Amino acid sequence: MGTISKRLLVSDLVTSDKIKQVPSNYIRPISDRPNLQNVVHDSIPLIDLHDLYSPGRSHVIDQIGRACSQYGFFQVKNHRVPESIISNMLQIAREFFKLPEEERLKCYSDDPTKTTRLSTSFNIRSEKVANWRDYLRLHCYPLQDYVHEWPTNPMSFRDHVAEYCMSTRGLALQLLEAISESLGLDKDYINKQLGKHGQHMCMNYYPPCPQPDLTYGLPGHTDPNAITILLQDDHVRGLQVLKNGHWVPVDPVPNTFIINIGDQIQVMSNDKYKSAMHRAVVNCDKERISIPTFYCPSLDATMGPAPELVTNDEPAVYNKFAYADYYDTFWERGLEKCLDVFKAA
Ligand code: OGA
Ligand code: NI
């Protein structure tokens, strides 16, 4: 018999109920478990962005292009997001998840259409097995449309998070230019395709888990947006990327970001670039925080392969679609791959 808990959030299950076993609704079938011992130690490219702003630019663009086609993942250093902004962001996230249960629950909602909400797992309305994760999700562009919805506790939440959002948006725009160029497109090509643009942020909180081999923080998935900029805790492992059929752990490197291509860049590139599968695993003794920034099209933007990348030899892999339809499909399918739904016949 599994424990039936009335707790909404997994963090409170761990701290208040002091559970020793994973409740049955979090247990994956045997064929779908993390196999924590079975990983391959490889690494994803680390790209120095310093020369992106100098005559060495074309060399950096080449590295980015190669990383996007071979891995769909890379890390960046010298990204111009100040260290103080990063450490304030991580600190605020830690403080938020340490707030008393009733204070955190003021932001709780399981409705994926809400623009500011604390929730748990992925989509508890549609999924069969729950994930060992709580998360606070915020929309952050245009900032003035959303900032009034954000938490005010911790007191400096809005200031620090807004600063972080603006700074990572700058980085996202630089990367989108570089990626456009690396595909042989005008440097503002992707920027223009994203319509009015969107930016969401997620603060993921993965509590320690008594049986990490039975469940996931987040199971394997690709991100539905254009590009993701992930900040992770300095010391705790958890992210894994699928490469050539093997899961590769991505060790945290202080003051770097992990960048991954989302589904929309795979679509625009007509499958030249890869939206790579990745997942988060949990561990017995340490909580972990990760903070992805999802840079995305606005819901009214029309997505499809770039006409310059469609030829007789390489016909369009995807039909045109509205990003709103894609985004709805993503939340409904519970992290199942959605790209296939939008493929050309
Ligand atoms: C995500 C994600 C990975 C992590 O939130 O989409 O992939 O390490 N997170 O938390
Ligand atoms: Ni992801």
Image (cartoon, rainbow, N blue to C red):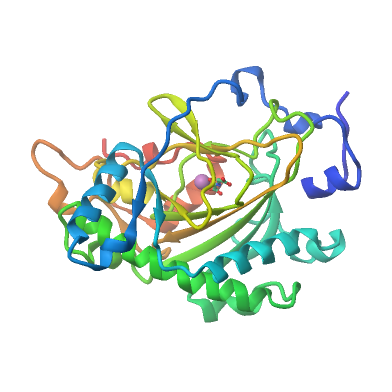
Quadrant assignment, res 51? bottom left
Front in this rendered view, residue 223 or 339: 223
Does residue 155 appear to the left or right of 268 in the view shown? Answer: right
Q: Residue extending furthest top? A: 30
Q: Residue extending furthest right? A: 17
Q: Residue at x 51, y 70 (%)?
A: 165
Measured as percent of width and height from the top left, residue 311 is found at: 10, 43
Q: Is residue 192 placed above or below 289 in the rendered structure? A: below
Measured as percent of width and height from the top left, residue 223 is found at: 46, 47
Does residue 281 appear to the left or right of 70 in the view shown? Answer: right
Measured as percent of width and height from the top left, residue 98 is found at: 79, 59
Number of marks in the rendered image: 0
Question: Could you tell me which quadrant the N terminus lies in?
Answer: top right
Q: Residue at x 14, y 38 (%)?
A: 314
Front in this rendered view, residue 333 or 274: 274
Question: Could you tell me which quadrant the C terminus lies in?
Answer: top left
Measured as percent of width and height from the top left, residue 294 is found at: 48, 58
Q: Residue at x 73, y 33 (%)?
A: 26
Q: Residue at x 31, y 61 (%)?
A: 176
Q: Is residue 207 placed above or below 196 in the rendered structure? A: above
Is any atom of residue 179 visible in this view? yes
Does residue 218 appear to the left or right of 14 in the view shown? Answer: left
Q: Is residue 26 placed above or below 58 in the rendered structure? A: above
Front in this rendered view, residue 343 or 237: 237
Q: Is residue 72 placed above or below 83 in the rendered structure? A: above
